[in-house]
Image: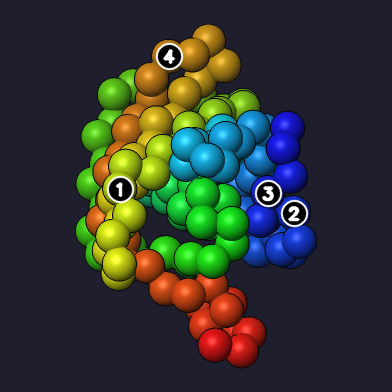
Amino acid sequence: MPATALDHLPRPPCAELLGWRLLDARPADGWVRIGFEGRPEFLNPAGYIQGGLLAAMLDDTMGPAVFIHTEGALYTASIDFNVSFMAPASPGPLFGEGQVVRLGKSIGFVEARLLDPAGDLIARATSSVRLIPAAKALGGPS
């Protein structure tokens, strides 16, 4: 896997909770593949991973796609976030694939898919995001 702008950032608590790990990236294409762990603590009463946690996984796939694509220059803040749930997710590994669709001067468009280990589509999302200089968003000098 190529080196990415994420290599030098500490993993935030939300990523730790979700079992987030970068599996593959094509920075020039704005594409990432992220692994997640669907923990038993994430289950709803029916025994499947609760939808809000699946949405968090999708969100935590799209932002890194932009960050890696811009070589760490831009951070995202969601403007809107649309999720379609296709199938229930069982506990265990899940895989997010994020893609930058288009970046403008201050707004970007991204999408993601969440897959189970067999490659079946669990959920998909699209998001419009505000593009923020990473140094400002992450607390460094602007």
Amino acid at pointer 1: Arg
Residue at (48% x, 75% y) in the render: 133
x, y percentage for residue 65? 49, 47
Residue 132, x across and y down, in percent: 42, 73
Marks 4 and 2: which is nearer the front?
A: 2
Q: Is residue 40 visible?
A: no
Would you place residue 10 above or below residue 55 in this image?
below
Circle 4: element type: loop
Residue 42's place in the image compared with 24, above or below, is: below
Residue with the mark numbered 4: 120
Determine the image quadrant of residue 20. top right
State left or right for residue 83 relative to residue 142. left
Type of the residue with mark 4: Asp
Work out whether residue 66 or residue 44 is closer to the camera in this orientation and state it: 66
Real-space CA distance between mark 2 and mark 1, rounded to the nearest whole angstrom: 24 Å
In this view of the protein, can residue 104 be seen by the observer? yes
Callout 2, which amino acid?
Asp
Closer-to-camera residue (44/59)? 59
Q: Report the Cα–Cα distance between label 3 and label 2.
A: 6 Å
Quadrant where the C terminus is found in the figure: bottom right
Q: Label 1, label 4: how many angstroms apart (C-alpha)? A: 26 Å
Q: Are marks 2 and 1 in contact (CB under 8 Å)?
A: no
User: Disc 1, disc 4: CB below 8 Å?
Assistant: no
Q: Residue at x 28, y 60 (%)?
A: 104
Q: Nearer the viewer, mark 2 or mark 1?
A: 1
Q: Residues within 10 Å of mark 3 (few under 14, many from 20)?
A: some
> Disc 1 designates what residue?
102
Label 3 belongs to which residue?
4
Q: Secondary structure at mark 1?
A: strand
The image's colour scheme reads: rainbow
